[in-house]
Image: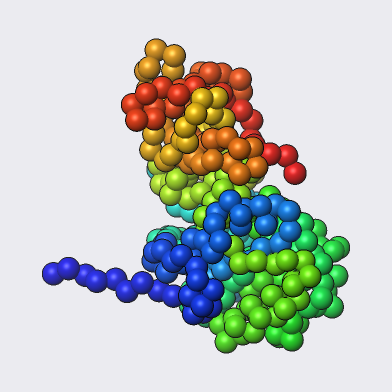
């Protein structure tokens, strides 16, 4: 018997339709891919300020005396370095050396943490956390009660400051505060985002979603604030060389292969840390690289990467036309010997080799 899965909608769904967004199914949700076009929206964020509905992301509360011990066990970064008001980027390894998810860890207060995970991985992550919850922590999925907007771009500070007494200009990256925002109580204001620009993410209860949207767009009229879809979110993160789960990292890619050694701390015991420590000492056989196209063509997920003899040396994981650089850029895994910056590689586009050069990421410097 065929199981019909109902597509979810965020609390902003009706607004997206009213604004004429092109809607698509993404991670089980109906989400806006663009409003006026990906390139236009990309440039709005790079030069001004844009607002993304990212309410599809998952939020998991971990509380209780064993909460830190549980988080230390299931994540690669060192959560003992957190303090109330601090955010940490981390990943969750599986028991074969791959990645279950990449995530943000918020310390709300002592023994009170919030994990923000990718929408498509919520149930998988919950199962994994509960499997390793031998510490008596209270694990609660609060995803369906939270609405989340990302306000990104160089003018985001000006817009947000009109709506709160919190001195957002002085907030350091990867910190947060909880307070009144646009007359909404207990909003979580986080100096985070996935665009490479100055930006913030605002978490509120669903009942305040429409009010939050209206407050932001009224406050940002002078700054030219615009709604931004997932299409531009993808090109913005790609220009910064940020990984996208399901493309650049997944259950079979290790954090060390993906260039995430900086969030993999071996001063503690975590799931499969012994294997990853061996991998670090011995070295990996493949690495995630960035590359820029020299020839005409746009690299796409799944395209083969060839050497000069047209031998397969890897696979493209993410690719697009960079609106900033006006050329094709991408990321992919290749054998280590082909991973050095400056190396010449070829992307198989319609089974023809198109020249590209391995480059260091980010593709653009902010």
Residue 366 visible, this angle: yes
- Left or right for 10, reference 164: left
- Left or right for 32, reference 224: left
Q: Percent x, y for residue 112?
A: 64, 72
Q: Nearer the viewer, residue 228 or 103?
A: 228
Relative height, residue 316 to residue 157 (above, below): above
Residue furthest toward the top?
A: 309
Tell me where residue 359 sits by quadrant: top right
Which residue appears at 24% of the width and 71% of the height?
A: 4
Which residue appears at 73% of the width and 66% of the height?
A: 224
Tell me where residue 73 sits by quadrant: bottom right
Q: Percent x, y for residue 253?
A: 45, 40
Image quarter where the N terminus lies is bottom left
Which residue appears at 53% of the width and 70% of the height?
A: 55
Relative height, residue 295 to residue 254 (above, below): above
Residue furthest toward the left?
A: 1
Q: Nearer the viewer, residue 224 or 90?
A: 224
Q: Percent x, y for residue 311?
A: 37, 18
């Amino acid at each position: 018997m065929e199981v019909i899965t109902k597509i979810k909608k965020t609390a902003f769904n009706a607004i997206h339709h009213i604004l004429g967004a092109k809607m698509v199914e993404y991670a089980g949700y109906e989400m806006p891919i663009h409003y006026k076009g990906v390139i236009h929206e990309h440039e709005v964020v790079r030069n001004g300020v844009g607002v993304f509905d990212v309410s599809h992301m998952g939020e998991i509360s971990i509380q209780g005396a064993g909460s830190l011990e549980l988080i230390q066990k299931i994540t690669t970064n060192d959560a003992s370095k957190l303090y109330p008001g601090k955010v940490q980027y981390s990943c969750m390894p599986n028991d074969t050396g791959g990645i279950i998810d990449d995530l943000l860890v918020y310390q709300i207060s002592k023994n009170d943490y919030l994990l923000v995970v990718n929408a498509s991985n919520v149930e998988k992550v919950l199962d994994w956390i509960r499997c390793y919850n031998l510490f008596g922590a209270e694990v609660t999925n609060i995803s369906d009660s939270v609405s989340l907007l990302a306000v990104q771009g160089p003018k985001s500070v000006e817009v947000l400051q009109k709506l709160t007494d919190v001195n957002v200009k002085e907030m350091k990256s990867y910190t947060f505060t909880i307070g009144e925002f646009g007359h909404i109580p207990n909003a979580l204001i986080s100096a985070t985002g996935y665009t490479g620009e100055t930006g913030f993410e605002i978490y509120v209860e669903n009942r305040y979603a429409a009010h939050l949207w209206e407050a932001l767009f009224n406050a940002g009229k002078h700054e030219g604030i615009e709604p931004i879809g997932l299409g531009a979110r993808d090109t913005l993160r790609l220009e910064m060389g940020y990984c996208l789960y399901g493309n650049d990292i997944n259950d079979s890619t290790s954090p060390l292969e993906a260039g995430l050694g900086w969030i993999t701390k071996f001063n503690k015991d975590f799931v499969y840390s012994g294997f990853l420590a061996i991998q670090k000492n011995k070295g990996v056989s493949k690495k995630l690289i960035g590359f820029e196209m020299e020839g005409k063509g746009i690299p796409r997920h799944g395209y083969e990467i060839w050497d000069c003899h047209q031998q397969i040396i890897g696979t493209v994981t993410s690719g697009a036309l960079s609106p900033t650089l006006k050329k094709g850029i991408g990321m992919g895994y290749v054998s280590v010997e082909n991973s050095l910056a400056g190396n010449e590689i070829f992307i198989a586009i319609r089974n023809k080799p198109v020249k590209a050069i391995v480059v260091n990421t980010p593709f653009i410097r902010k």
